[in-house]
Amino acid sequence: MAITIDQIKQLREATGAGILDCRKALEQAGGDYEKAVDFLREKGLAQSAKRSDRTASEGVIDVYSHGKGRVAVVVELNCESDFVAREESFRNLAHELSLQIAASQPRWIREEDIPAEELEREGNIAANRAREEGKPETIIPKIVEGALKKFKDETVLMRQKYVRDESMTVQDLYNGVVVALKENIIIRRFIRWELGEASN
Amino acid sequence: MAITIDQIKQLREATGAGILDCRKALEQAGGDYEKAVDFLREKGLAQSAKRSDRTASEGVIDVYSHGKGRVAVVVELNCESDFVAREESFRNLAHELSLQIAASQPRWIREEDIPAEELEREGNIAANRAREEGKPETIIPKIVEGALKKFKDETVLMRQKYVRDESMTVQDLYNGVVVALKENIIIRRFIRWELGEASN
């Protein structure tokens, strides 16, 4: 298997080992990053094993705490340049997303992040409920469609109404900042913790 | 299967449905919380499905941000009474844990949280490295033992040296607060995010 320069560079940055040692380790490991780290450590060529797959590193991680520590939100927003990362409008967007998540409790960032089982479950509940209510079978697909749209509008961050201005969605808010800053901006991940709730 | 009062209470709190409906839903679902929620929703007896398994709800979630948003830490600390949750020494402990986690990057809270594979991997690396260095087979168990101790001291929060006072461990810091407050205190969960790193 061919080892790329990028793989060698990544391993070298994480371990501090020499270029030739990194290449040899990757070759021995068949390109597997973790195994290559182990190889270097076994040879005494690397001290520690840092996390792999470091990718984009510009942006900001916004933290928000609410209700005297009963709710906490963390959002990571990535961009391309450190210039944009320092921009007030970029940092504001990160903080507005935190407030939005604290208030509106989305479960996913984008529609495509919803697991298929969840949509199926919601669809089944809507269909069974409609049948319980005696709705004719012919209109059930329409009812399910409406229920799923509502479910997505409530649980997907980008589809939620922006809490400060319900005439727009979070997607609209995000689009405005992307257009103004002329840079690719990615909402990478978020958590919303509530005191005493079950961990995910 | 027997449905407990606690199960009914939990379902009732989460859905707002009546006690008898909750009992019936749980019976139909064989005691499964999620299925009972679905049953109530299908019958039109519950609007929404909140997260299950709400347990202890006293304590604090501490958030800490560092390096202009390059690192974020969130720690949840639980206790038994809201009196203790408001105590300054309790809240200080939560914040000291955040600072500790930001600085010392533990991977687990307690020793028993380390997955067996991780210990095996570390042990194998130490053994293979000792063999590479030509160490006699007889002393390898001792070398592995020492390497695992070091690994745990570095990666387990409770075993780390307290960053503000290296003469004590985080366990010592925690024990001091527990003794002073005379209440059971649990470090429930934490995250430490760094900008651009891979998600767990």
Image: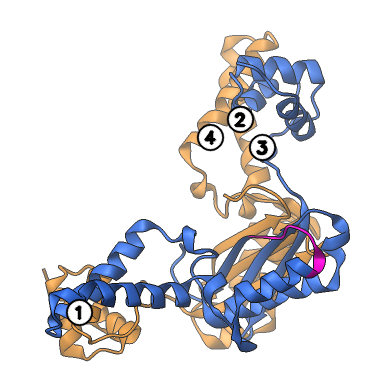
Chain colours: A blue, B orange
Badge 4 density bin: few <14, some 14–19, many ≥20, Cα 10 Å: some
Foreground label between 2 and 3: 2
Return the chain for callout 3: B
| Helix, strand or loop status at disc 2 | helix
Q: Relative to the observer, which residue lies in front, A89 or A45?
A: A89
Element type where label 1 sits in the image: helix
Callout 3 and callout 4 share a chain: yes
Label 4 close to label 1 by CB (< 8 Å): no
Label pair 1/3, CB-CB below 8 angstroms: no
Q: Amino acid at mark 4?
A: Leu
Determine the CA span between mark 1 and mark 3. Answer: 58 Å
A183 in magenta: yes
Return the residue at label 3: B150
Instruction: Residue B20: name its quadrant.
Output: bottom left
Tell which subunit mark 1 falls on.
Answer: A
Q: Mark 3 vs mark 4: which is more N-terminal?
A: 4
Q: Residue at x 79, y 24 (%)?
A: A17
Q: Which quarter of the picture shows residue B73?
A: bottom right
Write down the region rendered in magenta: A180-187
Where is mark 1, residue-wise?
A: A129
Earlier-in-chain disc, 2 versus 1: 2
* Whole-number angstrom distance, CA of label 3 to CA of label 4: 11 Å
Q: Nearer the viewer, residue A26 or B162?
A: A26
Q: Is residue A88 visible?
A: yes
Give the chain of mark 4.
B
Q: Which mark is residue A34?
A: 2
Q: Are marks 2 and 3 on the same chain?
A: no
Which circle marks residue B136 in the picture? none
Residue flagged by tag 1: what amino acid is it?
A: Arg
